Amino acid sequence: MTGSRTVGLLLALLIVVFLAPAGMAAAPNPANVRIALTAYSSSNWQIFAAVKRGFFKQENLNVEVIILRSSVIQTQALLANDIHMNTYSIDSAAKPVLQGAPLKLIGTSQEKPSFRAIVAKDIKSWGDLKGKTLAAGTPGGAFYTMFATMLAVNGIKKADYSYLSIGRSSDRIGAMKAGQIQACLIGQPDDFVLLDDGFKSLGFTQDYLKDVQYAGFTVNGRWAEKNEETVVAMRRALVKATRWLHDPANKKEAMAVLVDYFPDWKPSWQEQTYDMLIRQKMLSTDARPNMKGIDNFLKLAVEHGGIPSVPPLETWVDRSYVEKASR
């Protein structure tokens, strides 16, 4: 009897050992995804949150975030499939589209621009900028378009001022402090640095540019067609991150995510950034491309010489991925 029971027990164990793996689906290997940014910026808060809170991992994605400081290099890397998604300004996506590149804008990162016009300590109004030297980015670029529009709205024509192209915002700080320029368009935290030093603000870009979308997520359309599940998974992780950031209950943890990437920011800078991007909803609240905002921004880019025309939005703005991700 003892022998029979032993044999029966061994057979039962063998059945369990051999059958259990067949009944269990093996977890697929994580998809490796590379996301490019032009710089670490609070505009990329959704990406930071998706990394730190594990939203990418929940979607079985192994995400690497890299810095490519030029939008041209970002586009080249995207077309070569060296990266799989990037974030940059709307006009930076439109330029290669006009040249025939198969790019697709599949989501919004920062909706409203949070850049600020910072002026010298003796400047009291926009009119005081006539005859002065001003700076932003390269003529035809997003910063130039936004600053030129703000000036024009306030009655300052291009003939009224001299312009220097200073690409790096940290260099604009130096030029302001040295008195080489009397005004510039600049983002966080560099605007905080100048304000803390006594320089003045004439307002945010969004105070003068109404209903525009500043930046978005772009992919190589041909790669995306072959990797739809991965693209939807990326969008789903970022939709989760967007919703999580805009939940007031998560403020403390959201601020902690920001501090992880910007440990040198003063507490007052962190609080102001949260107020701008979350409370004032400069950061996208639903990740969906704002078609009217995109069109408005690109029309300004045409007006100020950034692009020759607005490429038909239906040919390169693809809302299907974020719609699937949001279900």
Image (cartoon, rainbow, N blue to C red):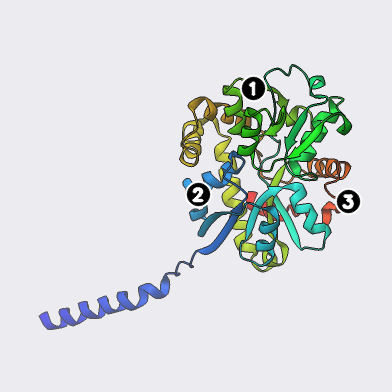
241 w.r.t. 6: above or below: above
- Residue position for label 3: 308
100 w.r.t. 152: above or below: below
- For residue 199, the mark is 1
The reply, left or right, for residue 76 in relation to residue 36 is right
Q: Secondary structure at mark 1?
A: loop
Q: Are marks 3 and 2 in contact (CB under 8 Å)?
A: no
Asked where in the image residue 211 lies, by quadrant, the reply is top right
Amino acid marked by disc 3:
Pro
N-term-proximal mark, 2 vs 1: 2
Amino acid marked by disc 2:
Val
Q: Residue at x 50, y 36 (%)?
A: 254
- Is residue 280 in view from this perspective? no
Depth order, front residue of 215/8:
215
- Residue position for label 2: 51
Name the quadrant of the N terminus: bottom left
Residue neighbourhood size for the residue with mark 1, other residues' Cα within 10 Å, grouped as few (<14), some (14–19), many (≥20)? many
Q: Secondary structure at mark 3?
A: loop
Amino acid marked by disc 1:
Phe
The Cα–Cα distance between marks 1 and 3, rounded to whole angstroms, is: 36 Å
- Residue 265 location, x and y as percent? 50, 32
286 w.r.t. 150: above or below: below
Q: Residue at x 67, y 54 (%)?
A: 324
- Is residue 294 in view from this perspective? yes
Q: Are marks 2 and 1 in contact (CB under 8 Å)?
A: no
Q: Secondary structure at mark 2?
A: helix
The reply, left or right, for residue 109 in relation to residue 267 is right
- Residue 197 location, x and y as percent? 58, 22
N-term-proximal mark, 1 vs 3: 1
For marks 3 and 2, give the one nearer the viewer.
3
N-term-proximal mark, 3 vs 2: 2
